[in-house]
Image (cartoon, rainbow, N blue to C red):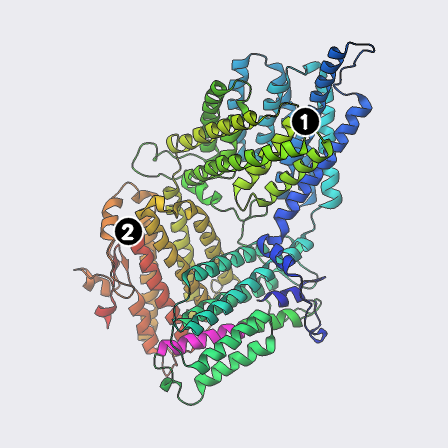
Amino acid sequence: MTANTIRHSSGTQPFDDDPRAGAPKRRPAWLDWLDATDPGQMRLRMATEVVFAIGVVLAAEWLFVRATGALQVRIPAGAPAAVAAQLWTLNHALLVISLMLGAILALISGFGVGMFGTARAQLQLLLFLPLPLLAMLAVGLSVHVRVVSLALLAVVLAVGAYCRRFGPPGFMGGMLAFMGVFLGFFIQDYITLGDFGWLVAEVLIGAAGVIAVHFTLFRPRPEAGLRRMQRSYAARAHTVASDVAELYEATVCSAQYEPDPGEERRLQRQLLRLNETALLIDAQLNSPAAVPAGFSAAALHQRLFDAEAALSNVARFALALARRPLPQPVCALVTAALAGVRDADLPAVFDSAAAIRKFLEDGDPQRVLVNPDDRVLLHRFASSVTALGTGLHAFRLYPVDQPPDDVPAAEFQPQVATFGGWLPGSAFIAGAASQERGGTGLIERIRLAPYARIAIQMGVAVGAAIIVGDALSGRRFYWAVIAAFITFMGANTAGEQLRKGVFRVAGTIVGVLIGAVLAHLVGERVWLQVLVVLVSLFLGLYLFRVNYAFMTIGITVMVSQLYVELDEFSNNLLLLRLAETAVGAGVAMLTVLLVLPLHVGRVARVAARQQLEALGDLADRSLDRLADPASEAGSDLELRAAARRVDMAYQALVATVRPMRTPLFGRLAERIAGFMGTAVAARHYARNLLLDSSTRYADLDAGGIAALAEARHQLAESVGAVTAALAPASANGDAADRDGEGDGDPGPGGARDDSASVEQAAGRQVAGQYVRSASLFARVADALPDQSVTSRPQLALRDLQLLDGALAEAARWAGVPVTDLDTVLR
């Protein structure tokens, strides 16, 4: 699906365009870039809301203090200049404390409010969040023994981390509870419990400001959110279409028949981002308010899935064709089709696809395309282009009040779970891995709920950061505490936590340099200080999902301006901040490696297992459809639901292994890269199987039916052997032995044979091995009477053979021996 077409269909309502209206207006390139880099503009809206809310709260707190004299000390008339200056400095510090209370509440509330989709749930959260802040603020003000206060910081933070078991309210409440006791400890020299009423008023003013800003300017509007996400999907789809057209043309023109590896990797990343946006749209369809009048969620989901699969196939088959020395007329037809897809030119799309089919059907194309695989690839490319054009035509044609008859009316059940509006990444996988037994070591065998594990680690890390940071600076140790605390936020495995610690130190270094320069340039001009604070915070919030280092830079610049306002700024102070941050991050990194570590390899095994289980489920449901198109398990909605589970598992796998794809991991990184390559291929083959599995095999004889059942059973058994090898029960077995046996490279079409071949040929599974089933599916294909290699039944069986090959390769990378039966059965 290209950007212009979806953009044309996502104006006031999706799918409301008149096909006679002409070509859609092109949007400015910078808007396309904004939509493509920020799905649904979620980062932009969150950063804007938080910064705007902070600005409103700061203004409200300042007016409140000026109007009531809250916490201010009266300066006696005629007081000596020195005394008056001292009192003025105290009052200014108390004013800054008032402003900080409201700003911290606004900052954390802005992060948490997006975790709920309804206005009522969001209001309940915003009304709840001041309570843990105030409760622990009172505790922090009450404890005046330094050792007890420091110990209390670690205890409250650990308990707050444990409260993640109660979902987003517990997660956000735990953060604010820690901030409460933290602030109480540091302001107790200025404020007593007798002034607590003023603090309550200031916190409530902050909460009121956040609620007013959120529900006045940023209230949840599901349908508008869906339209924004559609625009992001459109922009990303246009990027994919443009990239594949340019890559194909550059490859064919160079006559090297090998696409540039860097550009091909870039295209794969764009396809992954396109799939991410499609999944986020599916998640939003869970809300009835997001679905436009006259359409069902099932209709939107089906069209989105089919269009995304078609565009993905166009890209895949175009790259495959680019690697083959095809005749010039064929290359010209492919180039014209890709140009039509890129430009959303439906006549060009259909004409090019028809010309390719005519080329295959007329005359004797085998004299031109000697390799039968070339014909299959060209046919599949033309079919994918036609499917994409058909989807685009449907988006333009159907009015809102007249849904098409072929759209299923069944209730749609989205398979996509999000956290704070985003895909959960490795969070769910890490949670499952945490509760499974790991390796052979005593610590690895400990199973804990994820919130319990993180609570223990965070308590140890913060406690150690307090000790080391206090030794470095008794007054500024809190920078080490915050660095250790932040390292655990949004990071689910030891690898992710290590990366975050490194990014925090790197961001602090850059932030110290920028902060020092801006502090000297801005000086004591308050309006410029406020502007720098808000801009730096906005940029940090907007870019923190790109790289956490940006958030650290923004916070460091903001802190620099804060110390200018408190008349405490110096370059040495910024260097001390860097040292304390390095201490806190270093302590946190050591903690995640030594205290109940959840190693990324352990989590990756769970992610790989869930990916293979999802692939096996989709293949099994597709085979149900092949055997009986009317079966409930093989219905369109059930098949697409299974495919979305595959997509979710793959997105989680990518997020999990990202910290491992580095040269530092050596052989492990190579194995991960190999497994990921085969996982990508298997996912594509399984999605194609879904699309090709709509034909009933009525003409099969009894032998063919039996062969299909045998092949299905063999594939399921082999996938089960790999998932069993990745299960916890195998973790303390002979993993090292399997690693040694699986290092051979028998090639994609053949593996080693052994003495069990006769039993395997009879369809029996050898324990702990992946037994190939491609030859069994080939027998079924041979049994089909008078079927062209490009017929739907043949293509579905080809998908199954390719899927078996990809799964076998994945088994090798997972250390599971593979036995090939092709030679035995032919």
State the residue position of label 1: 565
Horizontal and vertical percent position of residue 701: 34, 77
Circle 1 SS class: helix
Helix or strand or loop: what does disc 2 sit on? loop
Q: Quadrant of residue 23?
A: bottom right
Answer whether labels 2 and 1 touch (C-beta < 8 Å): no
Residue situated furthest bottom in the rendering: 363
User: Is 696 above or below relative to 188?
Assistant: below
Give the residue at the far left of this rendering: 755
10 Å crowding of disc 2: few (<14), some (14-19), many (20+): many
Give the camera-side residue of 55 and 257.
257
* Span colored in magenta: 372-387
As drawn, 134 above or below 534: above
- The answer to whether residue 779 of the structure is visible from this angle is yes
Residue that appears at 37% across and 42% down: 602
Q: Earlier in the sequence, mark 2 or mark 1?
A: 1
Question: What residue is drawn where x is 71% and y is 35%?
Answer: 528
Q: Residue 386 colored magenta?
A: yes
**Residue 721 appears in view:** no
Residue 201, by quadrant, is top right
Image quadrant occupied by the N terminus: bottom right
Q: Quadrant of the C terminus?
A: bottom left
Rendered residue at 56%/78% (across/down): 350
- At label 2, the amino acid type is Gly
Q: Amino acid at mark 1?
A: Glu
Please report the residue visible at 69 percent of the width from the left and 54 percent of the height from the top.
Answer: 224
In the rendered image, which residue does mark 2 sit on? Answer: 815
The span from disc 2 to disc 1 (Cα, nearest Å) is 60 Å
Front position in the image: 24 or 804: 24
Q: Tell me the crowding category of disc 1: few under 14, some 14 to 19, or many 20 or more residues within 10 angstroms, Cα based.
A: many
Residue 655 is situated, as x and y percent measured from the top left of the image, at: 46, 48
- The mark closer to the camera, 2 or 1, is 1
